[in-house]
Image (cartoon, rainbow, N blue to C red):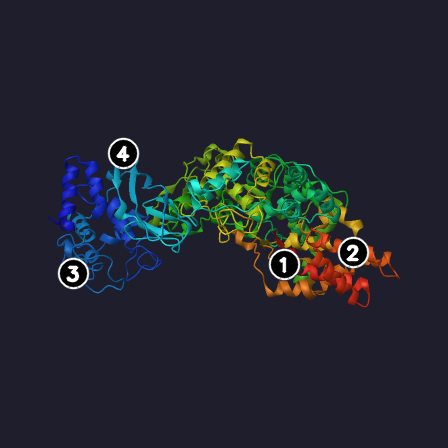
Amino acid sequence: MRTSPLTRYSLCLAGMALGMTTAVAQETVEIGATPVKEPSFRRHIIPLLSRAGCSSRECHGSFAGQGGFQLSLFGYDFEADLRQLTQDTDGGEGEVRVNLQEPAKSLLVMKPTVQMKHKGKERFKKDSWEHQMLVQWIASGAEDDPAETGEFERLAVSPREIVFAKAGEKTQLKVIAYWKNGRIEDVTRLTRFRSNDDAVASISETGLVESKTRGDTHVVAFYDNGVTPIPVMLPVSELVDTKYPVVPAPTKVDELVVTKLRKLGIVPSELCTDAEFLRRVSLDVAGTLPTPAEVTAFLADKSPDKRTQKIDALLNSPGHAAWWATQLCDFTGNSARQIFSENVTDLNGEFARQWWEWIYRRVKQNEPYDKIVAGIVLATSRSSPTQSYKDYALEMASYLRSENRADFALRETMPYFWARKNVQKPEDRALAFAHAFLGVRIECAQCHKHPFDQWTKADYVQFQAFFEPVRYDSDIRRDNEVNFVTATKELRAAAGGGNMMQARDAQSTEIRRRIDAGEVFPIHEVYITTRSPRSTIARPNAQAYSGRVLTPKLLGGDQVLIKEYSDPREPLVQWLRAKDNPFFARAFVNRVWAAYFHRGLVDPADDINLANPPVNAELMEHLAEGFVASGYDMKKLHRAILTSDTYQRSWKPNATNELDEKNFSRFVVRRLPAEVLLDAMTMATTANSRQQALLIEVAERQIGPNIAAFGLGDVIGNRNLADYALTTFGKPMRETNCDCERTTTPTLLQSLYTRNDPDLLARIEGQQGSTPSWIAELRSANPSVSPAADKLDGIISEVFLRTVSRPPTAAEMHQARTDIAAASDPLDGVRDLLWVMLNTREFTVNH
């Protein structure tokens, strides 16, 4: 006999009363009800409204609500939602959201079943189990039940992985919720589902997954504070299991990558050629092109371990330290435009350079990553707690004077991370910290529950509390005689009057004089305020927090009593270094992986969240655990990736991997980063006598201190040449908490620059600055006669070695000879060939 949804729901209730947990759990998968005596507000009603879309941003979960009725987005604030639902329950005959006298006439019941007008349209059917659950909750008193519910613990979804055999196949998910009080319930029909790629696999409201096309993705289950992704894939070929060919996996990285590829039926590409490898690894590791001599020697070397030797040499090169110092400056937001300091804005470029030099020194020495981060996070401007403002100002002057500067990089800490204009509020510091060191975006939790993660608004506010005592201004209470205020008064008095522009110029001149003379000048500082030491942070928003006092809490971790620490950032650093920290090591591993491939294991690389899982979770765990076990040794991490076959694969696809761009079965061609591309142009056009020096003298390169970023570049007219070129090719401004600021998207402006920008043409001809170009060097060696034919072939080969790091093919050599012969001056033909090669796609990409 067929039973109605309501009858089956009643059977579930009866089953629970008799202790039939297992049988009832199986029944509830069918009808979507939870085996309890009465529906629970927290376990059932709020998840039901969330799954039905009532608390979505398009409906009552929007910032202003809908129709005078507002729910918390995704149903995270139980108390506020209950008030909204029950605040007009007068028991009268009027329309009320929750009618205790006649539950079936409640607006909460009538509107989603469209028994009355509803802009949100029908959310579920009249007499459905959802309808009956709402009615029964209201009939039982429409009350909250925090004590009975307890604290949510975790979500378990089965199956844990789905591998389909063909398109159109379907698999039903089962979702089990666990609470810390021991309660276990099947909540499949109360769970929200999402597919990360509907083209590969779709998922219904009830958790039925259907295969669509070949490939892999994740489907994600959302219930309460649980977010669980499930890998779903349909092999792209028949080469799976016993049909899969033998693929060497010399490293653990390769083993884990190939394991995933075997499930997908993807066969990886062969290894790249020696020439491709040398160019690729030189650009990736040290941000530089190999010299022609280096290419020739490497191709002639028959040593079986020459690739590993080259990797080690590059990891120990100044270029590697410079390029990774620059990338760490990206992640941490080093920008002269953002560093705030009243009265000394002309020195912001110097401060940004000091920031870079501080990191460069530590990367060069291979200082552990956690120690570098601690030096940034725990930084204060004064070198010791007992240092006076006067001594602090004089110390800073020693780093800024025109001659015989002290080395800022020798300082134990680097405070400028906290000195930026965009991190002067505690909430901004929390966002910047999470982005830079956790690879997590928590902006959404400022206003509501994070849509794809576990973070609620309360989590965000409690995390923000760690940064309340951090200040960047002037701690004048510690110094009565000489402090920022007195130093500013002296500066203005010495600079004299005049209009605003004159006063500013006079103050800048006076500051420079004081610095060079070793005198006190006004400068702000990073410090921890002692104004109101306490372990909790009060929040006045009565509606959201009822005037409660929130204790600082680690993201996904424990509450912390700040009063036990002299610096509230100390427990943050301890948490970062904890072996079970879910973010710190993974965030850096993911960014390093993204730098060597076209994407991270988690993509975007700075958006680690539960609904955006790694494409290869086992590989992420292996690399992160190894990174922690090594003592956060950055070079070991780089080496583990670079020595793998996975990194050294060819860009040339085969029939199985031509569409694969996320499982690392081949090297995906990608545009060079802005700084690396400009340096490559310099290396390709500069004289032989300068090439080797540029490999060592990183201060003159864009991957180095990056003069354009610090406002110190050469200016012609109103244009900073380096800054213009870097911006054109996607260098990040470092003004937002997003790795997406750095772009590699091709634009028309980039094409115009490489074809006819005076800056590039001057590089080729040697007319920019005092550095001679290679073309000028050739003209000097051949002032009146054309090069001999055999010598010309060597020059043609060098053009290719300088630009694309390989010898020319026979066809390319023939074409080059023909074109040069047609030129009025053979060296003009060589110049044109060099220009052509600089404009090829092969030059501007890494492959």
- Quick check: can you spot residue 498? no
Nearer-N-terminus badge (1/4): 4
Pointer 1 or 2: first along the chain:
2
Q: Tell me the distance, in whole angstroms, between the alpha carbons under discs 1 and 4.
A: 61 Å
Q: What is the quadrant of residue 152 in the picture? A: top left
Q: Nearer the viewer, mark 2 or mark 3?
A: 2
Q: Where is residue 495 in the image (x, y as percent from the top left)?
A: 71, 55
Indicate the secondary structure of the residue bearing disc 1: helix
The residue type indicated by label 3 comes to Gly
Residue lying furthest left in this view? 1
Q: How crowded is mark 1: few (under 14 residues within 10 Å), some or many (20 or more)?
A: few
Q: What residue type is labelled 1?
A: Arg
Residue indicated by mark 2: 793
| Residue assigned mark 4 | 182
Q: Nearer the viewer, mark 4 or mark 2?
A: 2
Q: Are marks 4 and 3 in contact (CB under 8 Å)?
A: no
Q: Is mark 3 on a helix, strand or loop?
A: loop
Residue 53 drawn at (x, y percent):
30, 56
Is residue 407 depicted above or below 234 in this figure?
A: above
Apparent side of residue 20 relative to residue 204 in the rendered image (left or right): left
Q: What element carries label 2?
A: helix
Residue 50, given in percent of the width and then of the height, sits at 29, 52
Neighbours of disc 2 within 10 Å: few (<14), some (14-19), many (20+): some
Density class for disc 3 (Cα within 10 Å; few <14, some 14-19, many ≥20) is few
Q: Give the mark toward the camera: 1 or 2.
A: 2
Residue holding disc 3: 94
